Image (spheres, rainbow, N blue to C red):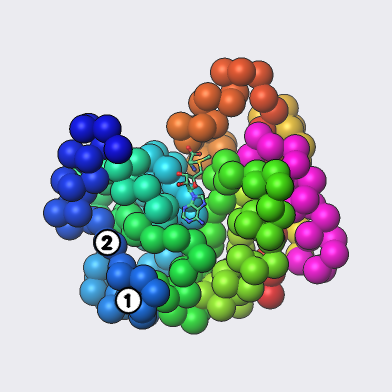
């Protein structure tokens, strides 16, 4: 790891909005995120594989009545979002460093209302490691409330096609699905929703600059 990454990795551990569970072991915040950190009863939204966390921070600004938790294994990346949130004094966003594989050690049954998957790795050769593959969906099912939703934004045809197949194969309830999010953005969307779709993650900016078309879907797995 480079010097700057090491510095960020060490610094972020001291932040009040950064959590690092010892895994595999049940984390003491499991079932207690609302009461012990957010100190409200608002819905919890996870961004899994949040990278630098700008999306969680952007959503937290738009939705002061929801709580956001960015999850990633890379602490030095989440440092960026964690600093932004502290500077903006956003109390409704936090970051949790863990492998998503152990997400059920960090969140209790029915603790979460929504999941965002933003530009997840396509895992070309390992379909079961895709974040919309059955082993992950089964983990999400445990922590999502009944009726909870999963949303995916991606540039990857492979991941999107796979997810579309999974939705059909497992009869997930598909609420929205478009192969060209920005090309097909309905005119009648309210401003807040338009704004959400225009919050761009780090990878989204890279891919759109290269001309990639962004795909989006929203589905229920219960
Ligand atoms: C392609 S990046 C996208 C980052 C961010 N969402 C964005 O759009 O800029 C994928 C991120 O997912 C994280 N990631 C992938 N698999 C993971 C896993 N099993 N557990 C935790 N993080 C994971 C990586 O560390 C990386 O930061």
Q: Is residue 185 above or below residue 113?
A: above
**Could you tell me residue 98's position as x and y percent?**
39, 61
Is 166 left or right of 12, judged from the image as shown?
right
Magenta stretch, overall SS = helix
The answer, for residue 153, to whether it is visible in the render is no
Residue 182 seen in the figure: yes
Residue 213 sits in quarter: top right
In the image, the segment drawn in magenta is 153-172
Q: How many marks?
A: 2
**Residue 106 horizontal/vertical position (percent):** 39, 72
Task: Tell whether position 161 is magenta.
Answer: yes
Residue appearing at x 56%, y 51% in the figure: 117
Q: Is residue 126 left or right of residue 36?
A: right
Q: For the point 16% across and 46% down, which residue is it?
A: 11
Tell me the residue that label 2 is attached to.
19
Residue 75 coordinates in the image, percent (x, y)? 31, 48
Q: Residue furthest top?
A: 210
| Label 2: how many Cα within 10 Å (few below 14, some 14–19, many 20+) | many
Residue at which label 1 appears: 27
Please tell me which residue lies in front, 166 or 190.
166
State which quarter of the image contains the N terminus.
top left
N-terminal-most mark, 2 or 1:
2
Proximity of marks 2 and 1: CB atoms separated by less than 8 Å: yes
Check disc 1: other Cα within 10 Å, few if <14, some if 14-19, many if 20+: some
Residue placed at 38% from the left, 68% from the top?
42
User: How far across and how far down the image is residue 206, in percent?
Assistant: 53, 24
Residue pictured at 67% horizontal, 25% vertical: 212
- Alpha carbon distance from label 2 to label 1: 10 Å
Badge number at residue 150? none
Badge 1 element: loop
Seen from the viewer's position, the closer of residues 3 and 86 is 3
């Amino acid at each position: 790891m480079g010097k700057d990454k090491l510095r960020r990795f060490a610094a972020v551990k001291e932040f009040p909005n950064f959590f690092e569970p010892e895994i595999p072991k049940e984390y003491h915040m499991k079932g207690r995120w609302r009461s012990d950190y957010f100190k409200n009863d608002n819905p919890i939204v996870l961004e899994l594989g949040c990278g630098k966390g700008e999306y969680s921070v952007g959503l937290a600004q738009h939705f002061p009545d929801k709580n956001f938790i960015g999850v990633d294994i890379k602490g030095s990346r989440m440092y960026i979002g964690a600093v932004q949130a502290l500077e903006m004094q956003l109390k409704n966003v936090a970051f949790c460093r863990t492998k998503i594989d152990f997400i059920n050690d960090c969140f209790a049954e029915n603790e979460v209302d929504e999941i965002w998957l933003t530009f997840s790795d396509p895992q070309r050769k390992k379909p079961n490691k895709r974040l919309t593959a059955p082993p992950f969906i089964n983990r999400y099912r445990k922590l999502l409330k009944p009726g909870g939703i999963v949303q995916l934004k991606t540039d990857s045809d492979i991941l999107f096609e796979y997810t579309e197949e999974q939705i059909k194969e497992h009869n997930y309830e598909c609420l929205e699905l478009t192969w060209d999010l920005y090309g097909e953005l309905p005119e009648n969307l309210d401003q807040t929703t338009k704004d959400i779709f225009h919050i761009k993650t780090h990878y989204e900016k890279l891919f759109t600059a290269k001309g990639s078309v962004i795909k989006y879907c929203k589905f229920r797995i219960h």
